[in-house]
Image (cartoon, grey):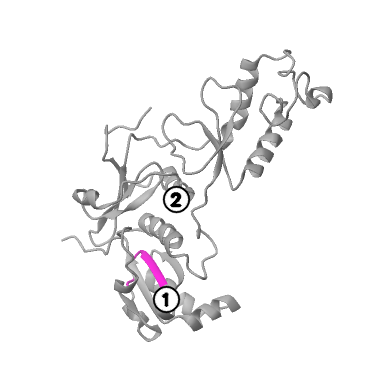
Amino acid sequence: MTAKLSLYDPRKDPTHALPSVGFDALAELPARPGVYVFFGLNDLALYVGKSIDIRQRVRTHVRDPAANRHRQMMAQTERIAWMRTSGDLGAQLLEADLIKRWVPLYNRQLRKRIRLVSWNWPDGETQPQLTDGQWVVTARSHLYGLFRNRRDGQMTLRDIANQEGLCLRVLGLEAGKGRCFGYQIGRCRGACCGEETLAAHTARARAAMERLRIENWPWPGRVAFREDGTANEASFHIVDHWHYQGSVSRLEQLETLPDSRGFDIDTYRILNRFLGRRDASIEVIPVDGDAEPLA
């Protein structure tokens, strides 16, 4: 018999409905994977965390509030709520999403959905362009690097150019005509003045930027990451183009989730860690379009 999980519906704010306890009843917390939340007065979210053993992790918080900031959080906590997940993947995805939605007072990381900047280099172009906003990573994308602002992106590309003898002018980082300053001091191989062909320069630049390349979303649409947990528990974590939409206990419930896209750095990092491990407990099930990943 499959155990019932309180799966996350991102369309609702379930803070008031979550099961919760006070400090005098920590034994009632589940010793299972999931997310826990420290709430203060008026249901103010103070802190969101995740663990493969909620009870043990919360007891660690309560037993050893070493830092002054931690002690302040404990003093303000009115109740401790939780949401079960089938395993560690679901807990990580849910934690990252709730922190962005609720902006807890004591979470320092993952608090904002940052509008990151990336270098986009379409086929046929001789230089990349900085792209910001809620772009979508598809099989046709050529995106390199994730930066908090345009200045960081430009500085990174400039460093690569200097290391590899690339032309700042051809890359669009320096204005002017004719021989660039880098060529005059021996840092550029001459793409700006015809001593190196644009095709050769483009090939070298793309190769140099390869270490920054963002992995494309390899499926035509949404994917369900089935995670099997203990006690015959299982859930499906729905992701579309590196955007976590929520979790369901049955694929028939997909229509209840929002149809939204947009690259999310935390979902990208979490899933790449799991995909890199080739974890046997995680099954990837494409639910839109073809069953096979795109080439």
Mark 2 lies on residue: 270
- How far across and down, in percent of the image, does residue 274 sit? 41, 48
Residue numbers of the magenta segment: 30-37
Give the residue at x 78% y 23%. Answer: 180
- How far across and down, in percent of the image, does residue 229 sit? 29, 58
Dot placed on the residue nearer the N-terminal end, 1 or 2: 1
Which corner quadrant holds the N terminus? bottom left
Give the residue at x 43% y 81%. Answer: 41
Mark 1 lies on residue: 39
Queried whether the magenta region covers residue 31, the answer comes back as yes
- How far across and down, in percent of the image, does residue 141 sit? 47, 31
- Answer whether labels 1 and 2 touch (C-beta < 8 Å): no
> In which image quadrant can residue 88 be found?
bottom left
Queried whether the magenta region covers residue 240, the answer comes back as no
Which type of secondary structure does the marked residue at label 2 adopt? helix
Foreground residue, 228 or 209? 209
- Local packing at callout 2 (Cα closer than 10 Å; few below 14, some 14-19, many 20+) is some
As displayed, is residue 141 above or below residue 21? above
Foreground residue, 58 or 120? 120
* Residue type marked 1: Phe
* Residue type marked 2: Ile
> In which image quadrant can residue 290 be found?
top left
